[in-house]
Image (cartoon, helix red, strand yellow):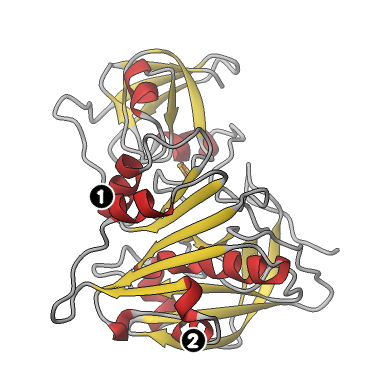
Amino acid sequence: MMMQPSLPGQDMTLPVVVRSMTLLARDTLAVEFTPQDGVTLPPFDAGAHVDLLLPNGIRRSYSLCNAPGDTGRYVVGVKKADPSRGASSYIHDTLRVGQAMKISAPKNNFPLDESAAKSVLIAGGIGITPMMSMIDRMEATGADWTLYYSCRTRADAAFLDRLDLLDKARCVNLNFDGEPGGAMLNLAEIIGAEQGDGVHFYACGPAPMLDAFEAATAGLPEGHAHLERFGGEPLPVSDDALETFEVECMQSGLNLTITPETTILDALLDNGIDIPFSCMDGVCGSCRVGVVEGTPDHRDMVLSDGELAENKVMMVCCSGSRSPKLVLDI
Ligand code: FES
């Protein structure tokens, strides 16, 4: 396998070419990447994502939506955000077939538990993308699954052609809450009806849907509810968050001043501290760092309520500080 060097703290990056771009639904594109000459794309598991290192300098994570085992290409689904923070608008308006660029190797924060007696997939909007690779995998292994897929309207729903090929009556439930007579999915009702021994639930979609999913699955056995958040919404900054503060790196002895112009992560990378990162949005959990002293201003969507209260870890890509100094275990 030939691959190119990576950014600090990252997995190796892969040189690829945009092979095709296909309209999947309103404002939603499938982008297919194939390797540049001499490169082999690593295999991936259902639920995996890759980071696109876009030519405009922005790095964003997107779930793979082609089948695991579909070697030689990666396909992601990209919904044009409104407003876009620069990634989806670039992909829709500027990126074109034939563009050479780099992507990360696949990573998986949303793996399928193949020991499940049944898997219930709940997708909202573009949250369908990781579910498609899961469905392909479960169709290949003969696993039992059901999909609940909700969009505003049919015109917003991607992959209907692929889902049409499946036995809809058995396993595909479509919901269009913005159409006449439509309503939001009732997740408590779905989970109540589907739950049983060995049933696992998966959800990916907008934050309100995932909040409802977390509430509805709170009573399930540990490890039976899985969710993946995608970023895009600005996270609230606390009233007492400081614009400028100090960061002391306990292991290296480095002291940094964080100003409104930079994030803690950027300052660490600029000063040679090798730290993993991916989404830069507070959703993937890659940049988790231990907090030895001080009070972070958490702005991520990864930490549990307990972790937020303890202040022992933080996501340095997006979070700030409520105390003049943070001492970090790096
Ligand atoms: S890089 Fe993803 S949470 Fe920080």
Circle number at residue 234: 1
Dividing the picture into quadrants, the one containing residue 298 is: top left
Name the quadrant of the C terminus: top right
Mark nearer the N terminus (2 vs 1)? 2
- Which residue is at a point 59% across and 80% down the rendered structure image? 32
Residue 233 appears in the figure: no
| Vertical relation: 324 (above or below) 226 | above
On the rendered structure, is 113 left or right of 25? right
Question: Tag 2, which secondary structure?
Answer: helix
Residue flagged by tag 1: what amino acid is it? Pro
Residue flagged by tag 2: what amino acid is it? Asp
| Vertical relation: 185 (above or below) 246 | below
Residue bearing mark 2: 164
Measured from the top left, where is residue 172 in percent x and y?
Answer: 45, 74
Mark 1, other Cα within 10 Å: few <14 / some 14–19 / many ≥20: few
Measured from the top left, where is residue 4 in percent x and y?
Answer: 75, 60
Disc number lying in front (2 or 1): 2
Depth check: give the residue in front, 75 or 267. 75
- Which residue is at a point 39% across and 48% down the rendered structure image? 281
Depth check: give the residue in front, 184 or 116. 116
Label 2, label 1: how far apart the Cα atoms are: 36 Å
Residue 323 appears in the figure: yes
Label 2 C-beta lies within 8 Å of the nearest ligand 1 atom: no
Name the quadrant of the N terminus: bottom right
| Vertical relation: 215 (above or below) 228 | above
Label 1 C-beta lies within 8 Å of the nearest ligand 1 atom: no
State how many labels appear. 2
Measured from the top left, where is residue 49 in percent x and y?
Answer: 57, 59
Depth check: give the residue in front, 63 or 286. 63
On the rendered structure, is 270 left or right of 39? left
- Which residue is at a point 33% across and 50% down the rendered structure image? 210
Dividing the picture into quadrants, the one containing residue 90 is: bottom left
